[in-house]
Amino acid sequence: MAGTRVCKDCQQEKPLSEFSPAGRRADGTHRPSIYCKPCGSERAMRHRDKNPDMQLNAHLLRAFGITLEEYNALLGAQGGVCAICGNPPALALGLRSRRQGRAVRPRLVVDHDHDTGAVRGLLCTPCNRGIGLLNDDPKRVRAALDYLEERG
């Protein structure tokens, strides 16, 4: 059958549209993956589940320029709690969140200066969102504090 391929995992012959591109041939056309999209997705999820630190390390490096080792050192220096509210991430988030049907360990997020990219510390999601919604502006944060103290 033209325009088909047999998946290496499920051994089913499927149209090439059921295979993700896996690279380019010398002539510039895309070479299809050896796994169909459902099998490829399942393999990728199993790999991420077996190697969670690898994915987190790549994310931290790409987004914030720090390694997982540096994240863990910062987490240790903060005593494993949010730098603002002092709660561990599980307490701050409530119940564990879920990703694609699998439990995800709650983590503190990296707070950084959006102008310089400098990492300031680790925060729980609510505290990070709170200062973000106040545009990371100390004057607005102080004004909100004054407001709450006057009317609270």
Image (cartoon, rainbow, N blue to C red):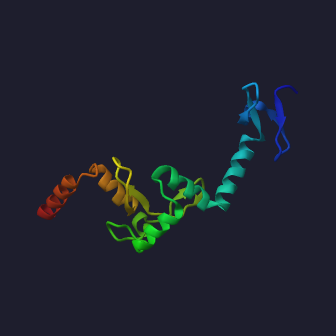
- Report x, y in % for residue 17: 73, 31
Residue at coordinates 59% horizontally, 53% vertically from top-left? 100
Side of 113 where 11 appears, left or right = right
Side of 47 where 109 appears, left or right = left
Q: Is residue 80 above or below residue 137?
A: below
Residue at coordinates 59% horizontally, 55% vertically from top-left? 55
Residue at coordinates 18% horizontally, 53% vertically from top-left? 139
Side of 1 where 119 appears, left or right = left
Residue 7 picture quarter: top right
- Report x, y in % for residue 65: 47, 54
Q: Nearer the viewer, residue 116 or 63?
A: 116
- Report x, y in % for residue 109: 43, 59
Q: Residue furthest right?
A: 1
Image quarter where the C terminus lies is bottom left
Image quarter where the N terminus lies is top right
Q: Nearer the viewer, residue 1 or 30?
A: 30
Residue at coordinates 30% horizontally, 50% vertically from top-left? 133
Q: Residue furthest bottom?
A: 79
